Amino acid sequence: MAKITVPGQNTFEVNEGTKLVLALEDNGIDILHRCGGKAKCTTCRVEVIEGEFGELTDIEKTAFSAKGIEGQYRLSCQVFVRSDATIKPMMTVNESGLDAGPRPSED
């Protein structure tokens, strides 16, 4: 089990290998995922404050490049929990007033 911390919101344990966006949503963290996990909208991006999710995937590189996004960000629909991490969702349902979007697949 890995511990995920979202400052000001919650800390919870999740099975390693769980897609981060699902771990967040299933533990009550307010996060958008407007395209349903297809890495098209970048609304599920999180700032990685502490922890490791491996190298950026090619799909993340393409999405971030297209939107001019730089920094310690990851698309939570494209990464899997590997170890303890502290993250901050960059876009939320509450702040945007939008529907979260369709639930991303588990793979």
Image (cartoon, grey):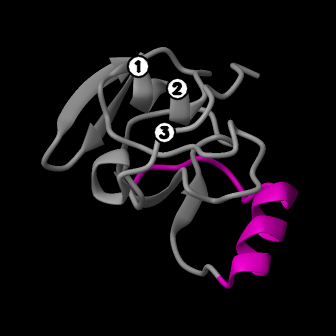
Q: Name the residue under label 1.
A: 26
Indicate yes or no whether the magenta region holds residue 62.
yes
Q: Name the residue under label 3.
A: 100
Q: Which residue is drawn at 79% across and 55% down?
A: 57
Q: Let me know if residue 89 appears in the view.
A: yes
| Mark 1 crowdedness (10 Å alpha carbons): few <14, some 14-19, many ≥20 | few
Q: Residue at x 76, y 22 (%)?
A: 107
Q: Residue at x 19, y 34 (%)?
A: 10
Q: Let me know if residue 82 appears in the view.
A: no
Q: Earlier in the sequence, mark 3 or mark 2?
A: 2
Horizontal and vertical percent position of residue 17: 62, 21
Give whichever of 103, 47 is nearer the camera: 103
- Where are the magenta residues, as a range? 50-68
Horizontal and vertical percent position of residue 106: 69, 19
Helix, strand or loop at disc 3? loop
Horizontal and vertical percent position of residue 74: 58, 57
Tell me how far mark 3 sits from mark 2, CA to CA: 12 Å
Mark 3 vs mark 2: in front: 3
Quarter assignment of residue 91: bottom left
Helix, strand or loop at disc 2? helix
Q: Which of marks 1 and 3 is nearer the N terminus?
A: 1
Residue 103 located left or right of residue 7: right
Q: Which numbered dot is residue 22?
A: 2
The answer to the question of whether label 1 and label 3 lie on touching residues, with beta carbons closer than 8 A, is: no
Give whichever of 56, 67 is nearer the camera: 67
Quarter assignment of residue 50: bottom left
Q: Residue at x 37, y 46 (%)?
A: 93
**Image: 18 above or below 69:** above
The three-letter code of the residue at mark 2 reads Leu
